[in-house]
Image (cartoon, rainbow, N blue to C red):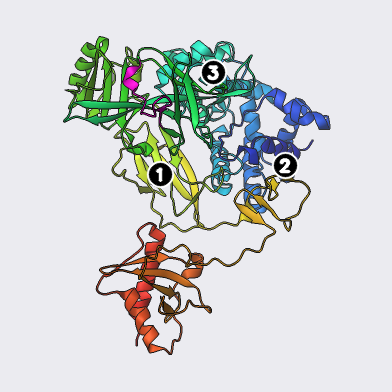
Amino acid sequence: MDYLTWNDLIASHFFQAEMAGSTVYLYVTEELIIELGQTRGADLADFIKAVKTGPIGVHGKGICQKALQSMNDWKYRRGRKGYPLYVGYLALFVLAAGIEEDFAPHAYYPRLRRLLGEEHTSGQYRDFDQMGILWDDLGRWANEDKLGEVGIFNINIAGNWIHVGRPIAQTLLTEEERRSLPYIFASADLDPTAPPSEEVIAFLLVKHGGKYLRNQTLKLLKESSDTEELRQALLGRIIDELREWDGTAEVPSSDGSKIYGFLKLCCNLDESAGRATLSLRCTTKHEFPEDDLFLSLEDNSQSFSCYEDGGSWSSQLISESDGKLLVASEFDWLKDLQLRSADSRWCFRLPPSPIRVFVEGDTEGLPDLVEVRQLPTQKTFYLAAYEDCWELLEKWGKSECKDFETLRITEGLPSRWRFFKAALAYSDKLIKREYPVLAFPTTVRLELRGIRLDRGNKFFKFAPPKVVLQGKNESIKLYWNDKLLHSKDVADIYELPTESTLDKQLHIEARRGKEILRRCSLSWVEEFSSGSCLPTQKLDCFGNFQKDVDNNTVGVRGAWIEGVDCPPFNFNTLLPIQDGQKIVFVGKETGQIVTCPDEALPIDWYPVWAIAKGRLLNKAMFCGSSLKESEPHRSTCNDKRKLQQWKEILWDSSGRTLPPMEDNRLKDLWKKFQKEAKRVRI
């Protein structure tokens, strides 16, 4: 096969619609090359020959120069159409990383030369220091050009090896290891919504992953000063996989898959009354069932119920016997607590621990304190601790925390437990080995929370995502299109400005000085066509699947109804009109105004605003068909009375009319109408 065929085969294997929103690793092995080429009678030798020859028209000296010229050819001659033309060369560099050998950066260049059939020489491979340009461009193509719709590609570097660390970072986990991680996570009781410290994760993976991870992976997970940088890179990769895990795992020797989640303690704390009311919520990254979820203790002695309460959280658990809130302090927090559904498909667990860490629940949209599995940085936290921990905990709190204090809680805690509070922790050195739950995060991570159009990084502009910066310290800053962002109200959570244009790529970077630690890209979407959505099954009016039907056949795909001419929306049917109340309907053109019920509804124009008139104040509500079609428009109006009414109700110099407050876009539209009304001359 020629180079172009190899390049597209490899690229399409990794970057595809099924990977939308998921992280792609360019994990290339000899077995994969053979698998991709076998249908055309090609093997590894054929692939090596193709990359040495290069694409047609590329005549650079040496592999690296051919790779750079391939990128330029794809960018300038092909207009960045199709797959990047240099993917085949990056695949070669990953192949040379020697995934079946120990992670040894000093051995990389000899392996690359051996793979290419070149003579052994010492030193860096010619022009290899320029290959970072290709890795960076692949990230731009996947994350910005494609907006994550064929996968998200992160430019990771293993250790401090700026050149060879890039291909090595793609090989830290094999595909087999990656597929085994959900079961290891489930066996180790790792929570994707609140991972513990890196040291705890490393310990648990060594303990539970012996049958599934390679010896070199297990060896790297164990503490070793010689490989600490690679170890941190591997742990960062595993934590990324954990955070993407939805809690589903195929369990050996069982029927089908099981959904694993966690029970989290929640605390309504009344310091003045000395009372703590502790409850339990379920949390999982998997979708909750539409109906209530019923769970029982393993011995079936008690049953509880809950329902989805937003995000990854359930409501507080309620006892089925008396309908009262579950009292979490009645359970022994030093012992394992498990709740299962009747069919055992759902399993939630509260792991035992002598120390429980709590933070304010506003980061999760919850009203009370919520339990987390790791010591937070630069923010207030609370601790519930068993008596065996008090001595070391108080020593650490007084020496390494700000405003550490013991709270006088006399009601609501289990026997021999105390509650502590600190404004923040300066250090974790004194306590993290004894109690790993009190260890700071050591890796920096960006998380986008918002409403996505699809699995890629397209977000609705009316609900911009919040950015969560995890592992932050004072030296790390967050930038939005090169502008410094500041967290508001809640530490580590940032709100994004929405003044950026819709067609502009938006970039977020976590930096330490000039070093970029993490980055991601996204774009705004204001309106979208349902026709652009992925094809799905079509149902008839009875809920049965339809086969071989066209778009004109009556049916339903999710929220989209096809084959039916829907009547125009009656904008007056849903307005909260009280008896005797008057509603003023205002159109987008000057002079378009009617007052109901004194006047008939308009038939030759559509209202944009419905203004409910009250005794003291009026309230404006948007009732237009779309924002794009609702912009104010100056036109000729010969009815001076209507023109005067239109101007007065909108310009509203007395301030009687309350503008729409629920959406910034509506507030902006209202201001445009006010400006237009101010210009009206009677």
**Foreground label between 2 and 3:** 3
In the picture, the disc for residue 184 is 3
x 37%, y 56%: residue: 662
Q: Label 2 belongs to which residue?
A: 55
Q: CA distance from mark 3 to mark 1?
A: 30 Å
Nearer to us: label 2 or label 1 = 1
Instruction: Give the residue drawn at x 46%, y 59%.
Output: 501
* Left or right of 496, for residue 30: right
Q: Which residues are magenta?
A: 316-331
Horizontal and vertical percent position of residue 636 = 45, 86
Q: Residue sitting at 70 percent across and 43 percent down?
A: 58
User: Which residue is identified by label 1?
Assistant: 466
State the image coordinates of residue 255 (x, y, percent, origin top left): 64, 19
When the figure is inspected, residue 364 is found, relative to residue 403, above or below; the finding is below
Can see residue 233? Answer: no
Main secondary structure of the magenta stretch: loop
Among numbered discs 2 and 1, the one appearing first in the sequence? 2
Task: Say which of 212 and 227 sits in front.
Answer: 212
* Number of disc labels: 3
Say which element carries label 3: helix
Q: Nearer the viewer, residue 497 or 568?
A: 568
In the rendered view, tell whether residue 547 sits above or below residue 631. above
Q: Position of residue 575 (x, y in %)?
A: 43, 64
The three-letter amino acid code for the residue at tag 3 is Ile
Quadrant where the N terminus is found in the figure:
top right
Marks 2/1: CA–CA distance? 43 Å
Residue 110 found in image quarter:
top right
Q: Secondary structure at mark 2?
A: loop
Is 425 situated left or right of 84 in this image? left
Label located before the other in sequence (3 or 1):
3
Does the residue at mark 3 contact the one at mark 1 (Cβ under 8 Å)? Answer: no
